[in-house]
Image: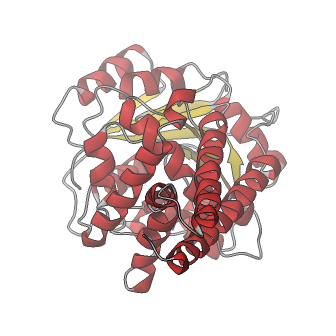
Amino acid sequence: MIPEAVYYVLAAVMSVGAAGWILIIRKMSMTFRLAPRLGGVPPDDPPMVSVIVPARNEENYVGRCLESLLAQDYPNYEVVAIDDSSEDRTGDIIAGLAAGDGRVVHVRSGQRPDGWMGKCWACMEGYGKASGELLLFTDADSVHSPGAVSAAVGQLVSGKLDALTANPRALVPGFWPAVFVPVQLCFGHNKHSMLDVNDPAKGTAYFLGSFYLIRRGAYEAAGTHEAVRDQIYEDMFMGRRAKAAGCRIMAVRGEDHVGAVMGRDLGGIWRDGRRPRVSGGGAAALRAPAVYALLLVAPLPALAISLLGGPGSWALLAASGACITMMFAGTAAEAVLGTASRWWHVALAPLGGLLLAARSIAGLTGSPAGYGGTAG
């Protein structure tokens, strides 16, 4: 028989977890309700846009990405596609599209200097070949609506912005990403709220590598990719540098115009979690695993214990049940608003939560990982 006091202690812990979920869902709801959507009409004299697409071993995605970019209704742009020493057909796909469309500038990445991450060097080489007044950085596994560039340029110009980044719809190509990504985004949209980015009084800032449009002068004021050359999360740090340099940046909801593959497969999800965290080491590094354990892992065992019965078990049943209910509610909201998951993936939210928690713990011994499925 479990002592009554144990039930009440566990119920108190689960009540803290339930309160945490309330705060997460509240912040997430505010973000989706109040954040601006990507949308605008470009000026009569549309500025030249250079779309910069770094690609390494992206044969499964780069063709779709470039074709969506070449289908834009914006009248004045080029697509600078960089083959970053790919070992698959990425370069051939880019070359084929470049041969058939003069708007594609095919760049073959040269020898990467010491101290540079691969994606940063590829972006820097793309910048060197770009002729646009505006630079649009995007990932090779992204896909864009025909009006994406027009909407972004219109919003940037009309809002007198220096840079704009769009939160994409998460494209989930398999079972594990579909189960994992909605749970992950519950926390991502809470910690990195678009509302905080858009508040000049707050230091929160980021760009998303899947879509950020920036004026050339602002990009140079932020130090270009040379300033973040050793960073894995170069888009995050580029956004921070731009805001710190006094640039006016905005984060918007872009799910109607931009989609980006997230997770890819179980191996990719696990490798990404082993990247060194942006938040640093020490106590900060332990915070995320502790939060995930409390909010995602502990509620199910707590519920099982409550079913053993006995004095005080009702309190644990109520608290753990509330925590689990809100886990499903938050995941369902993300699945509907931010991802391409299906309803039955939401039913597996505890599995996604367990994976997120385990990955976070494994990430304490993080090692560098690259993009396009390869290191560097």
Relative horizontal placement of residue 351, taking residue 113 as reference (left or right): right
- Rendering coords of residue 247 (x, y %): 69, 67
- Quadrant of the rendered image containing residue 139: top left
Say above or below: 285 vs 19.
below
Residue drawn where x is 66% and y is 75% of the image: 203
| Residue 270 position within the rendered picture, expressed as x and y whole percent measured from the top left | 29, 51
Q: Residue furthest left?
A: 87
Residue 28 visible in rendering:
yes
| 365 relative to 92, above or below | below
Along the viewing direction, whichever of 221 and 289 lies nearer the viewer: 289
Query: Residue at position x 56%, y 60% from top?
Result: 219
Q: Is residue 247 left or right of residue 224?
A: right
Q: Quadrant of the C terminus?
A: bottom left
Q: Residue at x 62, y 62 (%)?
A: 314
Q: Is residue 321 above or below residue 11?
A: above
Query: Where residue 280 sits in the image (x, y, percent)?
Result: 41, 78
Question: Quadrant of the image for the N terminus?
Answer: bottom left
Judging depth in this view, the residue of 46 and 151 nearest the camera is 151
> Among all residues in the image, which is located at the extreme top?
100
In the figure, residue 282 lies in which quadrant? bottom left
> From this viewpoint, is residue 133 visible?
no
Between residues 318 and 348, which one lies in front from this camera angle? 318
What residue do we see at 38% from left, 31% from top? Answer: 175
